[in-house]
Image: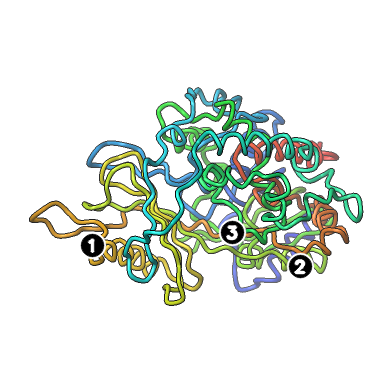
């Protein structure tokens, strides 16, 4: 306890003008209430009997799980996480909260047609090649599965066993386009696009495999992916929220932290300005280690050397209500030389009049992003690509819009060979701090839960 008392002193000294409204002492502090943070909190408290607290910036748990409850149709639109892999503890976690499951909904009700338009004008591009027939897509995917499954020990449940130097398989270091050509699997791209958004030809194959790994591919081919019943992904997190109760501090962020080998202390502030000083022997960081998120943690040189090399992907997801996008239709905007400095993708939500959207545009505020999305929708009307019902004005309204900005791998092949992933994983346990979440393993919820299960026993060592 002497070390924790020392940590309290330094944390308070660092922000001497702030006198905390409350102090707490816990076994484990968890930063972030997304998939990994929620799962860790439930397991640590319920299965290991530890005293935990979750610090969550938003007003609810779930992270990238986002649900829009449409008041017109009384339908839940899952516009964040849309499906689960039957891998690791996934189904057990749903069963724990008495949430039934069903065969995957999203990929069954896939898009009937995709319209390709010029991003600047909104007009239809007539010369876009039709995708391969479904039989050819599936054959290519089956071939890919025979290749990727041999690399599963390097990818799952995390990158603990990933090699370095000349021991890295040559396939994993190829540009993705070269890998596809080598094995003749180019025809699988529509399925890959549907599941994970696809990969550019220059992407290092390892990074494509992280998102398109064996459980994902076999789950698609074998029909074992699943969804909750009813199809509302927020039910699981709502029940976890009820269970954890006051052990979650919502609308709260860390403003200062002290970490060393004797323990950690964090000063937390909520939206109303109230502060809480929390001390614990262990810290579990379960949010994305973006520069903004980790700034209060006072990273050391080793941590900075790792996290500064990741790229930030600016992404917003949402739902738009319109009266002119046909049902069962997606729209892909193809950028040309005069394209706007952002990307919009329109997908079918499964509910008439509602489209799921993706918006990527660095430097845009939330309001600017929403307006850019509306402009892209209305561009399709002014170009004559779609039209509202006769006698009606075109309407496009963003009814849900959520930030999914995060970090992604794009380190060079040379960095991988020099042991970057080993350098990254060496951070685990340093300064009484452990890390989990989508950066540390393939980013699907099922993978994240399985990876978290590898972290918890290590985190608990020496914690009586």
In this figure, which residue is indicated by the disc labeled 1? 384
For disc 1, the neighbor class at 10 Å (few under 14, some 14 to 19, many from 20) is few
Q: Nearest the camera: 128 or 214?
A: 128
Residue at label 2? 304
Residue 84 in percent (x, y) is at 55, 34
Question: Which element is circle 1 on?
Answer: loop
Q: Is residue 314 left or right of residue 376?
A: right
Label 2: few (<14), some or many (≥20) within 10 Å? Answer: few
Q: Earlier in the sequence, mark 1 or mark 3?
A: 1
Residue for point 76% across, 53% down: 433
x, y (%) of residue 31?
63, 52
**3D distance between C-alphas at marks 3 and 2:** 17 Å
Q: Alpha-carbon distance for marks 1 and 2?
A: 51 Å
Residue 59 in view of the camera: yes
What's the distance in space between the residues labelled 1 and 3, CA to CA?
36 Å
Q: Secondary structure at mark 3?
A: strand
Q: Position of residue 178 (x, y in %)?
A: 71, 55
**Which residue is at the far right?**
166
The residue to which callout 3 is attached is 406
Query: From what the image shows, is residue 443 above or below residue 393?
Result: above
């Amino acid at each position: 306890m002497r070390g924790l008392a020392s940590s309290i002193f330094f944390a308070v000294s660092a922000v001497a003008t702030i006198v905390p409204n409350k102090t707490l002492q816990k076994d484990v502090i968890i930063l972030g209430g997304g998939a990994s943070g929620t799962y860790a909190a439930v397991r640590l408290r319920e299965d290991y009997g530890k005293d935990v607290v979750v610090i969550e910036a938003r007003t609810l748990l779930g992270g990238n799980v986002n649900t829009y409850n449409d008041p017109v149709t009384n339908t839940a639109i899952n516009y964040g996480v849309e499906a689960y892999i039957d891998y690791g503890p996934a189904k057990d976690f749903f069963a724990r909260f008495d949430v039934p499951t069903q065969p995957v909904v999203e990929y069954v009700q896939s898009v009937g047609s995709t319209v390709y338009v010029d991003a600047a004008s909104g007009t239809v591009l007539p010369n876009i090649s039709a995708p391969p027939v479904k039989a050819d897509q599936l054959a290519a995917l089956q071939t890919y599965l025979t290749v990727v499954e041999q690399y599963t020990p390097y990818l799952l449940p995390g990158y603990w066993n990933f090699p370095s130097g000349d021991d890295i398989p040559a396939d994993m270091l190829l540009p993705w386009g070269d890998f596809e050509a080598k094995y003749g699997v180019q025809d699988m791209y529509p399925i890959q696009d549907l599941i994970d958004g696809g990969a550019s030809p220059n992407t290092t194959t390892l990074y494509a495999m992280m998102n398109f790994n064996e459980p994902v591919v076999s789950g698609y081919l074998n029909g074992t992916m699943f969804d909750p019943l009813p199809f509302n992904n927020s039910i699981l997190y709502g029940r976890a929220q009820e269970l954890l109760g006051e052990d979650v501090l919502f609308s709260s962020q860390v403003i200062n932290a002290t970490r060393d080998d004797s323990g950690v202390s964090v000063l937390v502030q909520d939206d109303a300005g109230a502060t809480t000083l929390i001390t614990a022997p262990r810290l579990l960081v379960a949010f994305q280690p973006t520069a903004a998120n980790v700034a209060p943690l006072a990273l050391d040189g080793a941590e900075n050397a790792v996290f500064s090399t990741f790229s930030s992907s600016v992404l917003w997801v949402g739902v738009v209500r319109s009266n002119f996008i046909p049902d069962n239709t997606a729209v892909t905007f193809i950028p040309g030389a005069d394209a706007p400095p952002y990307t919009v993708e329109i997908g079918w939500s499964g509910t008439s009049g509602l489209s799921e959207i993706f918006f990527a545009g660095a430097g845009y505020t939330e309001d600017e992003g929403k307006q850019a999305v509306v402009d892209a929708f209305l561009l399709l009307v002014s170009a004559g690509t779609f039209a509202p019902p006769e006698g009606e004005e075109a309407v496009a309204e963003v009814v849900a819009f959520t930030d999914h900005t995060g970090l992604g791998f794009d380190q060079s092949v040379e960095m991988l060979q020099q042991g970057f992933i080993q350098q990254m994983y060496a951070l685990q346990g340093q300064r009484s701090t452990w890390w989990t979440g989508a950066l540390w393993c393939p980013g699907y919820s099922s993978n994240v839960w399985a990876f978290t299960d590898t972290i918890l026993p290590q985190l608990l060592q020496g914690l009586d």
